[in-house]
């Protein structure tokens, strides 16, 4: 049986991660610069403006990144199905004839909007944290002024400064209360969204080619995914046969965040021999 190449989205993911890390670094640099001033109102406003401007840049960047990356991942997913079903000689040939059917057009639009919204939440949180940091620093500086007189901000201890600036490096606090660093979160989000778009697009293409089954890829996973590797699944819930429906597989076991598993289409699972 044919195997499409295992997708590798490191390049796209790293581009986004680097962009976010750079933006965060710039924001933190602005905050550090503020510490060298007297925390006059005009200075605070100027720094806030710079930060907001920097974050609107990264927002534009992530909107574009989402559009390009989701289209790219879906294209690969579709090509994987075309190649696996034997419709072209090579995977490269499959890439050349990729067309987005209605389901996949909708899928990509939704994936782009979704990813943009999730990334927007990150920039909004950095902005919120940065403003909070400015407020905290201002309050600390005031306290120092009260007790030590002028040049208060220069007296703010390095430890306090570092703690206030470091607090901006939280992209999101998830449902379990985990605090995600900006770079780690951007990495997980980008990777997960791209793999998801890849998988869903490959399934839509399989269905439009009349292939109602799929086989979960295998790469020797060590986590809970391992028990699903090589498993044959139904791609639609009412396909005949005694196979689990892909949508019913527990998400904490397979297709979880950062999961690298894909699904290859199978026309007739009874003819498939594990080898
Ligand atoms: Zn997995």
Image (cartoon, rainbow, N blue to C red):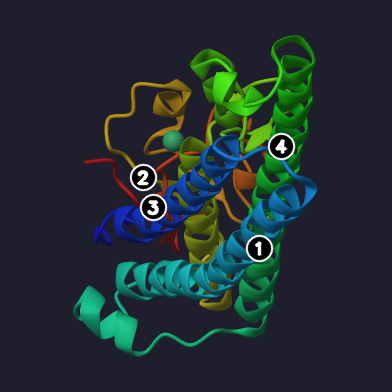
Q: Which residue is mark 3?
A: 18
Disc 1/disc 2 C-alpha distance (Å):
28 Å
Q: Nearer the viewer, mark 3 or mark 2?
A: 3
Q: Are marks 4 and 3 in contact (CB under 8 Å)?
A: no
Instruction: Give the distance between the C-alpha atoms of the residues marked 4 and 3, in whole angstroms.
Output: 25 Å
**Mark earlier in primary sequence (1, 2):** 1
Q: Secondary structure at mark 2?
A: loop
**Residue 172 x, y percent position in the rendering:** 67, 35
The residue under the point 57% across, 68% down is 57
Q: Residue at x 45, y 31 (%)?
A: 228
* 245 in relation to 83, above or below: above
The image quadrant where one finds ligand 1 is top left
Q: Residue 185: x, y in percent?
A: 53, 39
- Circle 1 residues within 10 Å: few <14, some 14–19, many ≥20: many
Asked if the residue at tag 2 contacts the one at tag 4, i.e. Cβ–Cβ closer than 8 Å, the answer is no
- The reply to whether discs 1 and 3 touch (Cβ–Cβ < 8 Å) is no
Q: Which mark is residue 134?
A: 4
Of pointers 4 and 1, the one earlier in the residue sequence: 1
Depth check, mark 1 against mark 3: the one in front is 3
Q: Is residue 30 visible?
A: yes
Total of numbered circles in the picture?
A: 4
Q: Name the residue carrying label 2.
A: 217
Q: Give the labeled residue for mark 1.
A: 116
**Mark 1 beta carbon near ligand 1 (under 8 Å):** no
Is 61 on the left or on the right of 141, as rendered?
A: left
Helix, strand or loop at disc 3?
helix
């Amino acid at each position: 049986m044919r195997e499409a190449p295992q997708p590798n989205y490191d390049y796209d993911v790293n581009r986004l991660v680097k962009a976010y890390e750079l933006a965060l670094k710039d924001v933190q640099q602005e905050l550090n610069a503020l510490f060298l001033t007297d925390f006059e109102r005009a200075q605070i406003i100027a720094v806030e403006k710079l930060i907001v401007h920097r974050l609107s840049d990264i927002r534009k960047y992530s909107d574009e990144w989402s559009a390009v990356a989701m289209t790219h991942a879906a294209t690969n997913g579709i090509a994987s199905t075309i190649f696996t079903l034997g419709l072209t000689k090579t995977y490269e040939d499959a890439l050349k004839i990729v067309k987005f059917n209605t389901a996949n057009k909708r899928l990509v639009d939704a994936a782009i909007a979704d990813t943009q919204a999730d990334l927007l939440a990150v920039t909004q949180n950095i902005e919120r944290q940065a403003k909070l940091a400015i407020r905290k620093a201002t309050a600390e500086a005031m306290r120092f002024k009260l007790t030590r007189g002028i040049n208060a901000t220069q007296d703010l201890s390095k430890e306090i400064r570092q703690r206030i600036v470091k607090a901006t490096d939280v992209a999101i606090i998830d449902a379990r209360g985990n605090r995600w660093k900006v770079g780690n979160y951007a990495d997980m989000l980008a990777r997960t969204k791209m793999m998801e778009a890849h998988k869903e697009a490959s399934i839509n293409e399989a269905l439009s080619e009349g292939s109602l089954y799929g086989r979960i890829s295998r790469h020797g996973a060590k986590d809970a995914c391992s028990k699903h590797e090589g498993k044959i699944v139904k791609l639609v819930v009412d396909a005949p046969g005694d196979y689990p429906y892909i949508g019913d597989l527990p998400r904490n076991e397979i297709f979880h965040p950062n999961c690298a598993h894909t699904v290859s289409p199978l026309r007739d699972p009874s003819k498939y021999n594990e080898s």
